[in-house]
Image: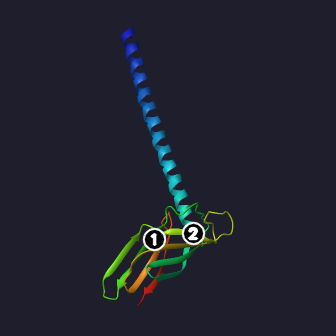
């Protein structure tokens, strides 16, 4: 066995070690990324499971929609930034209506603890100016983590 064979063997072993290290480090990185994604998914699902709201009532008068809803879950909301408000239904003439309300004013009307935070068992109101013809409608309020509640109401003459 000559000196060139020893050098070739050492280079071959080094290449094998380098390839093995690259494979192991890549696998570790992929595993860590998958584990972090799974943790985030579980965290979001637990938030959804702990979230519940209940629309208590809806009134519509002179172009103003007013509704009260209660946080019946265990999740607290620091603000109403991610809340969505939808109105859909039919007019008396049979026309379908679907509205995504972009300008709504949310207020906590029954504060129990933590001023300015929508805690469990607190009641909030939402007020918006929207023009609706006579008919039957449904109000849908959704939380930032996509938990919604609906309530039907009528607009009459």
Which type of secondary structure does the marked residue at label 2 adopt? strand
Quarter of the view holding residue 7: top left
**Measured from the top left, where is residue 41 in percent x and y?**
50, 56
Of residues 27 and 139, the one nearer the viewer is: 139
**Measured from the top left, where is residue 36 in percent x and y?**
51, 48
Quarter of the view holding residue 85: bottom left
Q: Which residue is found at the position 45% from the left and 40% from the top? A: 27
Q: Provide the residue designation for mark 1.
A: 85
Which type of secondary structure does the marked residue at label 1 adopt? strand
Of residues 67 and 19, the one nearer the viewer is: 67
Confirm whether residue 2 shows in the render. Answer: no
Question: Which mark is drawn over residue 130?
Answer: none
Q: How far is disc 2 from disc 1 in space, using C-alphas?
A: 14 Å
Q: Which residue is found at the position 51% from the left and 68% from the top? A: 105
Q: Provide the residue designation for mark 2.
A: 107
Q: Residue furthest right?
A: 113
Q: Is residue 39 left or right of residue 113?
A: left
**Measured from the top left, where is residue 18 in percent x and y?**
43, 27
Q: Is residue 64 above or below residue 107?
A: below
Confirm whether residue 128 shows in the render. Answer: yes
Q: Residues within 10 Å of mark 1 (few under 14, many from 20)?
A: some
Quarter of the view holding residue 123: bottom right
């Amino acid at each position: 066995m000559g000196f060139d064979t020893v050098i070739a063997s050492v280079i071959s072993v080094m290449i094998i070690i380098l390839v093995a290290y690259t494979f192991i480090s890549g696998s570790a990185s992929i595993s860590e990324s998958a584990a972090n994604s799974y943790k985030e998914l579980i965290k979001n699902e637990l938030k959804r499971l702990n979230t519940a709201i209940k629309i208590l009532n809806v009134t519509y008068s002179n172009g103003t929609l007013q509704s009260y809803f209660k946080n019946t879950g265990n999740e607290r909301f620091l603000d109403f930034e991610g809340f969505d408000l939808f109105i859909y239904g039919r007019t008396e003439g049979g026309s379908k209506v679907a509205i995504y309300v972009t300008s709504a004013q949310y207020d906590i009307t029954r504060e129990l603890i933590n001023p300015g935070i929508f805690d469990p068992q607190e009641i909030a109101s939402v007020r918006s100016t929207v023009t609706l013809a006579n008919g039957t409608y449904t109000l849908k309020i959704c939380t930032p983590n996509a938990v919604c509640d609906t309530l039907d109401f009528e607009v009459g003459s």
